[in-house]
Amino acid sequence: MREKVEKALERIRPALQQDGGDLELIDVTDDGIVKVKLTGACGSCPMSQMTLKHGIEQRLRDEVPEVEMVEAV
């Protein structure tokens, strides 16, 4: 599953980078929790939780149905 998540994040990453942000994949647990670190502008943006839940998590769940949740660490 980690490989599928990495590939999906590579497709998401350019949108974040356009706004000066990025993310780093930290872990993918056996129970479908994806842990990421938001960096750059995303790390300090007040809208980062919305981006995480309504952008990154939604898109990941669409592409990798095994993903249950995405959380920032």
Image: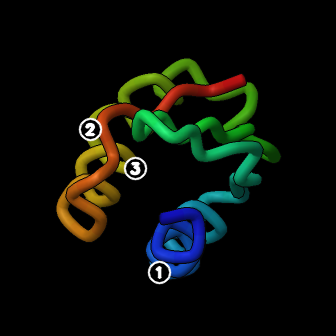
* Residue type, mark 1 in image: Arg
- C-alpha separation, residue under disc 3 versus residue under disc 2: 6 Å
User: Pointer 2: residues within 10 angstroms few (<14), some, or many (20+)?
Assistant: few
Q: Position of residue 57 (x, y in %)?
A: 34, 44
Looking at marks 3 and 1 on the same chain, the residue that comes earlier in the sequence is marked by 1
- Residue 55, above or below 46: below
Q: Which mark is residue 27?
A: none
User: Pointer 1: residues within 10 angstroms few (<14), some, or many (20+)?
Assistant: few
Q: Position of residue 3 (x, y in %)?
A: 58, 75
**Residue at 26% from the left image edge and 70% from the top image edge:** 63
Q: Which mark is residue 56?
A: 3
* Residue type, mark 3 in image: Ile
Disc 2 is placed on an element classified as helix
Looking at marks 1 and 2 on the same chain, the residue that comes earlier in the sequence is marked by 1
Residue furthest to the right: 40
Q: Position of residue 33 (x, y in %)?
A: 47, 34
Q: Nearer the viewer, residue 8 or 38?
A: 8
- Residue 28, above or below 71: below
Q: Nearer the viewer, residue 54 or 26?
A: 26
What residue does disc 2 label?
54
**Residue at 53% from the left image edge and 27% from the top image edge:** 71
Q: Which quadrant of the structure image shows residue 53? A: top left
Q: Is residue 41 visible?
A: no
* Residue type, mark 2 in image: His
Asked if residue 7 lies left or right of residue 62, the reply is right
**Residue at 36% from the left image edge and 32% from the top image edge:** 69
Q: Which mark is residue 11?
A: 1
**Residue at 26% from the left image edge and 38% from the top image edge:** 54
